[in-house]
Image (tube, rainbow, N blue to C red):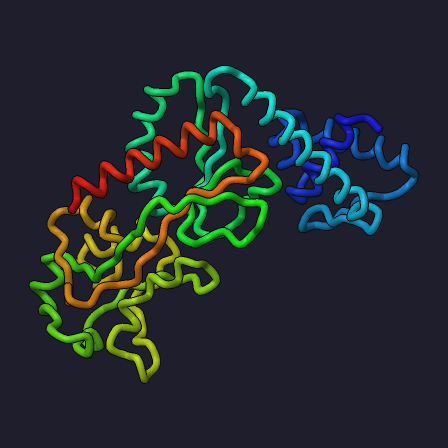
């Protein structure tokens, strides 16, 4: 079977759209359609059912998709291995990281990494879940706030992220400063609004002082931690925020400082197949040094 036809099929199966598949492969929608039609004619089966909502795999399509997924992973692995045979770290490295950590802490420091490794490029994908499968090389390494649970993944603990309750001076001037956790019942609470994400622990402001009762209702639910920071800075209410993020807005005030929020262990994770990767090692070493320097500066 022709590899180009298989690539078009695989892209369409993953995206559920001829247009999206064409965009991924940098070819036209009509070219994708022709290649899939030719593949279906060659195999003598229908691979997709066409619906108004997009493409849906048939049973035969599911069977072929399992095979093309294995082929795509093998091709990505071969490409990564070839890049890492060079004497120096070079080429593209795909990294996934939590939205807040990636956008607030990591991005401002990436210039230093690029200065040290001018032959490398970074494809940074921000995500608060596990939407990028490291074993399928959808990303080659990850910064995560939870430990890996698969045997084929290598992980290194980078540090611990602390959180605290914060509010803006304008909010506290208008609504007063709570002196006890129970007084939070009379305040506007901002909480992380996606219980399916590991980041749902960022609802500490709803739970503190409510051990035996239902969590207090949030005035604002947001499924994005940087947006929570913006909401606090705008004087909307009180939220539990990572301390490293709050330090970027110097006038924010800690609320109930004796009641610390949850802590997150920060891990660098990558597939065991890439344990000799010069690109992964370069990025891991960069992160380790930057986090150590940040820890010392903020003792």
Q: Nearer the viewer, residue 106 or 27?
A: 106
- Tell which residue pokes out farthest to the bottom in this image: 212
Above or below, comparing residue 35 to residue 12 in the picture: above
Say above or below: 151 vs 86: below
Residue 287 left/right relative to 42: left
- In the displayed structure, does residue 186 sit left or right of residue 116? left
**Residue positioned 36% across, 41% down in the render:** 102
> What is the total number of numbered labels drawn onto the structure image?
0
Residue at point 68% right, 36% down? 11
Say left or right for 156 vs 39.
Answer: left
Determine whether, in the image, residue 137 is placed left or right of residue 63.
Answer: left
Inspect this view and state whether residue 156 appears: yes
Looking at the image, which residue is at 66% across and 25% down? 27
Where residue 149 appears, as percent x and y from the top left, is 53, 54
- Classify residue 12 by image quadrant: top right
Measured as percent of width and height from the top left, residue 23 is found at 61, 31
Which residue is found at the position 61% from the left and 31% from the top?
24
Q: Position of residue 82 (x, y in %)?
A: 60, 21
Q: Kindly tell me whether residue 98 is visible in this rendering.
A: no
Q: Quadrant of the N terminus?
A: top right
Q: Is residue 57 above or below residue 239?
A: above
Pick whichever, 214 or 218, lies toward us: 214
Above or below, 297 relative to 261: above
> Farthest left residue?
173
Q: Percent position (x, y) of residue 47?
A: 81, 43
């Amino acid at each position: 079977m022709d590899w180009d036809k298989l690539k078009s099929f695989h892209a369409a199966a993953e995206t559920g759209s001829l247009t999206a598949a064409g965009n991924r492969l940098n070819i036209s929608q009509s070219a994708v359609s022709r290649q899939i039609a030719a593949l279906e004619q060659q195999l003598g089966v229908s691979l997709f059912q066409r619906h108004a909502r997009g493409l849906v795999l048939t049973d035969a399509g599911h069977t072929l998709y399992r095979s093309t997924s294995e082929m795509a992973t093998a091709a990505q692995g071969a490409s990564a291995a070839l890049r890492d045979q060079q004497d120096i770290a070079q080429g593209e490295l795909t990294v996934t990281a939590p939205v807040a950590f990636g956008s607030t802490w990591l991005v401002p420091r990436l210039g230093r990494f690029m200065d040290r490794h001018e032959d490398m490029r970074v494809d940074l994908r921000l995500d608060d879940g596990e939407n990028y499968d490291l074993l399928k090389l959808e990303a080659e390494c990850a910064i995560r706030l939870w430990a890996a649970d698969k045997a084929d993944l290598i992980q290194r603990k980078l540090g611990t992220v602390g959180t605290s309750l914060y509010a803006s001076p304008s909010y506290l001037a208008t609504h007063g400063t709570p002196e006890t956790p129970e007084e939070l019942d009379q305040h506007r609470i901002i909480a992380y609004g996606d219980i399916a994400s590991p980041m749902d622990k960022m609802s500490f402001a709803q739970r503190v002082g409510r051990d035996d009762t239902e969590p207090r209702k949030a005035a604002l639910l947001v499924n994005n931690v940087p947006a929570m920071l913006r909401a606090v800075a705008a004087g909307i209410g009180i939220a539990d925020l990572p301390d490293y993020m709050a330090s970027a807005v110097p006038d924010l005030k800690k609320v109930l400082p004796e009641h610390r929020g949850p802590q997150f262990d920060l891990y660098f994770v990558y597939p065991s197949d890439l344990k000799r990767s010069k690109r992964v090692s370069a990025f891991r070493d960069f992160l380790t040094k930057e986090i150590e320097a940040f820890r010392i500066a903020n003792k």
